[in-house]
Amino acid sequence: MLTVEHESSRGASGGNTIRTLLTQTVYHFSEMIKPRVSALCAVFLPFLMCISAVTAGGAQNAQLASKEINARVESLLKQMTTEEKIGQTVQYSAGFATGPSASKLTYDELVAQGRVGSMLNVVGAEHTNHYQHIAMEKSRLRIPLIFGLDVIHGHHTTFPVPLAIAATWDPEAAETVARVSAREARADGINWVFSPMVDIARDARWGRIIESNGEDPYLSSALARAWVKGYQQGDLSNADSVAACVKHFAAYGAAIAGRDYNAVDMSELTLRQIYLKPYHAAVEAGVATVMTSFNSINGVPATADPFTLTQILRKEWGFNGFVVSDWGAVAELKNHAIGDGPTVARKALEAGTDMDMEGNLYATVIAEQVRSGKIPESVLDEAVRRILRVKFALGLFDHPFTDVGPRYEPTPERRAIARKVADETMVLLKNDPMEGVGNLLPLPPKMKTVALIGPMADDALNLEGAWTVAGNPKNVITLKAALTQRLGEKLLYARGCGLLSGKDEAALKGITFTGTSSVSNQPISDDQKSIAAAVEIARKADVAILALGEPTNWMEGEASSRTTLGFTGAQEQLLEAVVATGKPVILVVLAGRPLELKWAAGHVPAILEAWSPGIAAGPAVEDILFGDVNPSGKLPASLPRAVGQEPLYYAQMPTGRPARGDLSHMPRSAPEKFVSRYMDEENSALFPFGWGLSYTRFSYSQPTVDRAEIPVHQFAQDHKPVATVGVDVKNSGSIAGTEVVQLYIRNTSASVEQPLRELKGFTRVALAPGETRHVTFPLGFDELNFYNAELKKTMEPTTYDIWVGGNSLATAATSLKIIEEKSIKRSRIGARGQMVDAHIAFCNSLRPNHLCNR
Ligand code: BGC
């Protein structure tokens, strides 16, 4: 019998990070949480080693497992009536609606009767205290309410959207954002945040990609752990900790055709190997709660799926917190046609959905079924236990109220953190020299005239980013404000066009979270006229900065799927008109999702992906444009050439008919035709996963592995690193910079086919000009295992190809052989070869539109 501590035990280190400057050591997950010791069964077969995926998991959150808390829970449970128990499983929105409609009930009365366990969307200490006083003073058992809220990218201090934070490849940045958010939320009476969202998102049509960590399970898992750590701080009873809620379980991001709420259909192997990993990482990090997803998985709605909610989450992973449904998802099970109200409520509760968010179904149809014996009381008891445990761990029974203080506004200190995080999120996509001008970025300190053009340049609401509840656009410093302060009269400004055209813009402005909508009375803008005015100011300027994107408010996030991924409204037309002036153009893309930038990539020399940056939008973009900060962000999701490529991700599976070489033209022969390709577009991303340039250049040596061959059985003994990959990374330019060094592997021969590349390590390295640093990555079972056809976590004799570099096209390579025999051959340390320049920028500049196909 072998023991395995956790499935994916290593995260990544933060270098030049928010809280600490460069730490070169690779960050071990075990340092973040106490490792659980759970027994996984190991099965030795003649030539392969398997570890069963089906295991009895230990408790993941030690606090929730504490004897003292559980004794208090049991003693309280004994005193509860069936109605009071059901009350704990009920959550209402007594504030605004974050779904199609909200219940409008007499909440004061229900709380006094002990018929509500939780509220969401009640914000502000005076409001939460109002309900808490009723619960603590009028309800029979005085059980405190737990208040939940969507704190997605900051609370009052609005940070960049989560996808942008993922572009930092810096778990410490995510942790810092979570910590600041927790403090601000707690001061507002919120003790539970519906974050992090770790749904793997490989389809940019899906609007909720902005809330995700992007396409990769390894990166997303590292960030998931960091978000949980930041919110919960390893101790839920801290006055400024909040319970985190990892969502949406499970596989919500794989909605068919990228259409939100749509069904998900995937093999269990893919589910386990890719989609479940980040949720599992959050559970291992001790997350206190999990939210179900709206979708079905292989025909079973996730909110009533015993396989994911009980078998995997509880039995295999040992999750010991509670599960809340998504908004209305229990009641919406009726639309999935798996039964009437009572039936779907029973199915959800029995499957493991402990709390009904705004479904108003547990409240109305469970009691009768418990009384009649249709639902065993023990099932209800278990749900209540799980909820009460979290309330006790948060200290709510002892400190139920929140001190009422002045309404929070971002302090200068938090603004500085927001700016630093936003700086790290910026991804320099392209910075080609322009004839007669050279590289446009960074801009020289002494600029003559700059034209700032575009509907995103001064749009505080949309720069703040989608899905903020407590955020206030008034706190956002726009690009126009920041550049005006820097350049004074040298800055010319024109909006150029609207974010949407004609009536669409007015309609979008009218929609509110409260569910009402009205069409704005503002006159519909004339895009042609405003484009002509923008062209005029571009002509007068030395350089034009275009700030374009998509409306983040209501066109990104939930229920915001798109079938096109270009700039909205007349923005593309505006871009083309300004480029046609022949003036140097810098494009700043301000959007939470990957947009299709094909024309821009072919015609604009410098492109900065700035995402939805939050309150520090202007200063952060300014930092990068003027070189006060050297860009270091890397794409957490591939940018497509065409929407038809979606879902698009780097970790593609092999095919029997791979397409190689230049796919930019129609096939001219049978070998060019009968391969896995498109007739009208290349396969590769326009800008691939991991991509991001710097104002300096980084070079990589030939990576080496400290052991050339390793017997497979050695990986079974423990989950410490078995081999180490080393590489020298050099800053070969003349300014300081931070590189995200990335390690990819390919298992070249397995019983089940494996992706062409998989990320298995990363670290941020800050380097002075000319400085070289030796970077190491551990490789062990956690990095090298995969699920075999029997769904067992496995390693087999094989050769792993290994690449290290600055993006997913990295070319500097080595390999590691896993052998059958148990005799250990002498380790062979590969000689460090010549420095390999893996900076792909030069390739891009040679073939601007083709970005170095693999
Ligand atoms: C969203 C969740 C969110 C919940 C509560 C739902 O519509 O899908 O992500 O946490 O509402 O606001």
Image (cartoon, helix red, strand yellow):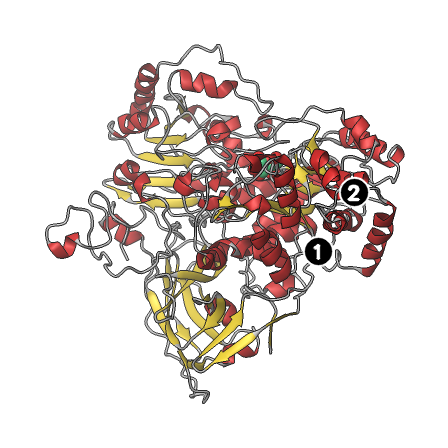
> Closest to the observer: 847 or 229?
229
Q: Can residue 204 be seen in this view?
A: no
In the rendered structure, the answer to whether residue 681 lies left or right of residue 234 reads left
Tell me: 811 left or right of 232.
Answer: left
Say above or below: 775 vs 333: below
Residue shown at 75%/56% (left/top)? Answer: 64
- The image position of residue 845, as x and y in percent, is 26, 48
Secondary structure under badge 2? helix
C-alpha separation, residue under disc 1 versus residue under disc 2 = 28 Å
Image quadrant of ligand 1 equals top right
Q: In this view, does 504 lie above or below 427?
A: above
Q: Name the residue under label 2.
A: 85
How many C-alpha atoms fall within 10 Å of the one at disc 2: few (<14), some, or many (≥20)?
many
**Amino acid identity at mark 2:** Lys
Q: Nearest the camera: 540 or 259? A: 259
**In which quadrant will I find the C terminus?**
bottom left
Is ligand 1 less than 8 Å from the beta carbon at label 2? no
Judge whether 670 appears above or below 588 on screen.
below
Q: Where is residue 635 in the image (x, y as percent from the top left)?
A: 42, 48
Front position in the image: 204 or 766? 204
What amino acid is labelled 1 in the image? Gly
Q: Which of marks 1 and 2 is nearer the N terminus?
A: 2
Q: Which of marks 1 and 2 is in front?
A: 2
Q: Residues within 10 Å of mark 1 (few under 14, many from 20)?
A: many
Give the residue at x 49% y 28%. 554
Residue 1 placement (x, y as % from top left): 60, 78
- Where residue 234 is drawn, which disc sits there? 1
